Amino acid sequence: MNRPLVKDLMLKPRSGRGLVPFQRGRLPQPAPVVPETPLREAQFVAFDIETTGNTPFLVIEIGAERFELEGSLSLFDTLVKTGAPINPYARRRHLISPDMLRGAPGFADVRPAFLHFAEGAALVEHSHDAFDSYLIGRGLKQKLEHPILDTSALARAVLELPAGQTPGLARVVEMLGVEASPAHAALSDAQATAAVFRRLVLLGHERLGWRTVGDLLQAQVRPVVDRSALEGRAKPRRRRRSGEMSGREIPAAPTRTA
């Protein structure tokens, strides 16, 4: 597969340490993760995204942790420059101001770097509607090749929560008793997602017999989301039979912040 060119790039973490070079060195890794990959042999990238909070929800921060079940391997952390306004509600949640984005790289450069960082791994998000992975893949000529795992759906399966519940990351952290502090900052939320994932896999192995990445893909139930409004397309019309439910399509929420 032809991959985007990864430029020499300076990332800007929100920590205030200034610009830091993106390390392009290849991490030692097994073959790319596929459904048949045993969980103990797989590598994963837990990630989180913060956005402007306004349609079309532009990315202003990406945080990620590459890890194995035994522990962390590497981190990816940067603010992302955009000239678009930030929704006041979103800003109160993630505490990112336009001034903080000055000097940060743009998304066109950050995305190839992130995909390089995540090469060969399964992606892990706490995003029941696959919003974060949608933002990463939006506009690519080819779909993301990574298996995508959702800790909110896996938590629902392992903890036997009602089908309609969508547990937030902070709630799952508390329920599992893992040491993590999600705070609507992309890197801390990504690290919390990684910690939650490791704990869920352990419990899922004990209770449900999870052994491969495919076992997790089969266990997670995720909604089908209509994103035509975000992509500038008219919503496709479909004639339904009398009494037919509209399925599980969920319109994109206009106030989505991350």
Image (cartoon, grey):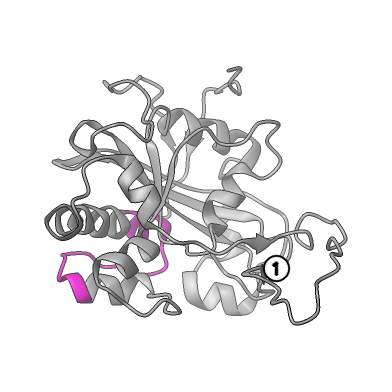
- Seen as rendered, the residue at the extreme front is 242
Magenta stretch holds residue 74: no
**x then y, percent, for residue 39:** 23, 39
Between 111 and 224, the one nearer to me in the picture: 224
For the point 64% across and 62% down, which residue is it? 225
The amino acid type found where label 1 is placed reads Asn
Q: Is residue 37 above or below residue 220?
A: above
Magenta stretch holds residue 186: yes
First to last magenta residue range: 175-190
Does the image show residue 30?
yes
Between 6 and 255, the one nearer to me in the picture: 255
For the point 39% across and 63% down, which residue is it? 153
Instruction: Kindly indicate the quadrant of the structure image that contains residue 4.
Output: top right
For the point 69% across and 74% down, which residue is it? 254
Between 121 and 186, the one nearer to me in the picture: 121
Q: Is residue 201 above or below residue 122?
A: below
**x then y, percent, for residue 144:** 56, 36
> In this rendering, would 212 be left or right of 7?
left
Instruction: Kindly indicate the quadrant of the structure image that contains residue 196.
Output: bottom left
**x then y, percent, for residue 90:** 57, 73
Disc 1: which residue? 54
